Image (spheres, rainbow, N blue to C red):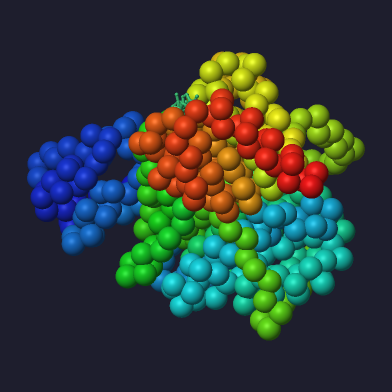
Amino acid sequence: MGINVSLEKCVGCSLCVKACGQNAITIADKKAVIDMAKCNMCSACVEACKKFGAITITKDSSAKIDVNDYKNVAVFIEQHEGKVAGVSYEMLGEGRKLANDLGEKLVAVLLGSQMNDVAADLVKYGADKVVYFDSPELVQFRDDTYTALVCEFVESDKPSILLAGATAVGRSFVPKIAARVWGGLTADCTKLEVDTKRRLLLGTRPAFGGNLMATIIAPHHRPQIATVRHKVMKAAARDESRSGEVAVITVDAAKIAKINERTKILDIVKEVATTVNIAEADIIVSGGRGMGNAQNFSLIRDLAQALGGAIGASRAAVDSEWIPYSHQVGQTGKTVCPKLYIACGISGSVQHMAGMQSSDFIIAINKDPNADIFQIANLGIVGDALEILPELTKAFKEKVCA
Ligand code: FAD
């Protein structure tokens, strides 16, 4: 990968100097000079120099990407033991919207074994085409194999956008794909949109410790790749009337053995869940600093129990050691999307809201009528949570027992 200044084309206008956030460019003898120790290849200077085309970034001396060769939105379908991961349905829902906005096709890429029915089913969830790599060797995720085959797909189908879950699997192999195919990766997005005029993916994600939301574009790279956390976006709805194409690619065991020379699976040890999985709960009752102390947190537990829900918490409550970290909701905790989220004594910081704002129905209980949480609540109760919670628990218990 390199960045080059064409001395013939450069007019020394210094637009690139102004565009460079790294202070890596100076003008000497009316020509731009790039300090490679400072340059992070962000391509802002390439954009600024569009009129003259004097600055170019290349993968290597022989490879250059023509962004116009790339089309369609692709979604990597994650599967575990033949079952499609929930995040993949969310990516299909989001991918469908992006493809519609661009007037392009949505392509699902699945790797597994004996999953022909599942592959065909992905069409019902919005895919126009499914590319299914089939081999007994693909049942288990392995970095090298999955990277090689998805790169093979990218090189043959040339999707303009590639989406995947920001799961352990996605986080492990998607950066490798980006590096190999000259893609532009934005990890952990919370929002995806397209600029239809420039045909660019706009990936929004928290930046600078969550203190601001940054929207990132990759104008000179293809595909534009984004990973998104589970439960941030709505899953695609099943539509029986949809039809599409399924391309099955049978992968030869010898080919996989060659790709996968470095690793061998000896055993698979499943994690035993010892803590509540709030990420999967339909109802969450969550407590924040406003609960006052660890004893008062039992009011949260009581209501959660009466509703058959799980217990969530803000970071302030976790930091105060009123409840373990596994219950923390937010940017540095879990992202949740329950049918009902009850926030008690939680102010509604950006970091907390990043983890729960796509809940179906939000009830907020807060003493302060101006608390930010009320801006996203469907129902707001202004008052003392320590008084309101016991009343609510009593009322729900009576309702359930009646
Ligand atoms: P506060 O902001 O102190 O709010 C307490 C609220 O309780 C107030 O609105 C108050 O009016 C109300 N209240 C007080 N008494 C009562 C009462 N008796 N009845 C009703 N209401 C009452 N935070 C998270 O939650 N999750 C994260 O994942 C997370 N990640 C972060 C990552 C980074 C990089 C940073 C910098 C911060 C992060 N935070 C996170 C912290 C976040 O910025 C806030 O500090 C935190 O969310 C505040 O928690 P809180 O709302 O419980 O407390």
Residue at the (38%, 42%) spot, across then down: 213
Query: Can you tell which quarter of the image residue 343 is in?
Result: top right
Residue 310 visible: no
The answer to whether 329 is drawn above or below residue 187 in the figure is above
Residue at the (40%, 45%) spot, across then down: 375
Query: Can you tell which quarter of the image residue 28 is in?
Result: top left
Towards the viewer: 361 or 6: 361
Towards the viewer: 259 or 216: 216
The answer to whether 298 is drawn above or below residue 63 in the figure is above
Left or right of 179 on screen, residue 327: right
Residue at the (44%, 30%) spot, across then down: 367
Left or right of 196 on screen, residue 181: right
Q: Position of residue 324 (x, y in %)?
A: 67, 22
The answer to whether 400 is drawn above or below residue 64 in the figure is above
Residue 215 visible: yes
Q: Position of residue 180 (x, y in %)?
A: 56, 51
The total of numbered circles placed on residues is 0
Residue at the (28%, 48%) spot, across then down: 44
What residue occupies the far right of the structure in this picture?
A: 267
Left or right of 138 on screen, residue 238: left
Q: Position of residue 229 (x, y in %)?
A: 58, 47
Towards the viewer: 273 or 205: 273
Query: Can you tell which quarter of the image residue 84 is in?
Result: bottom right
Q: Position of residue 201 (x, y in %)?
A: 42, 60
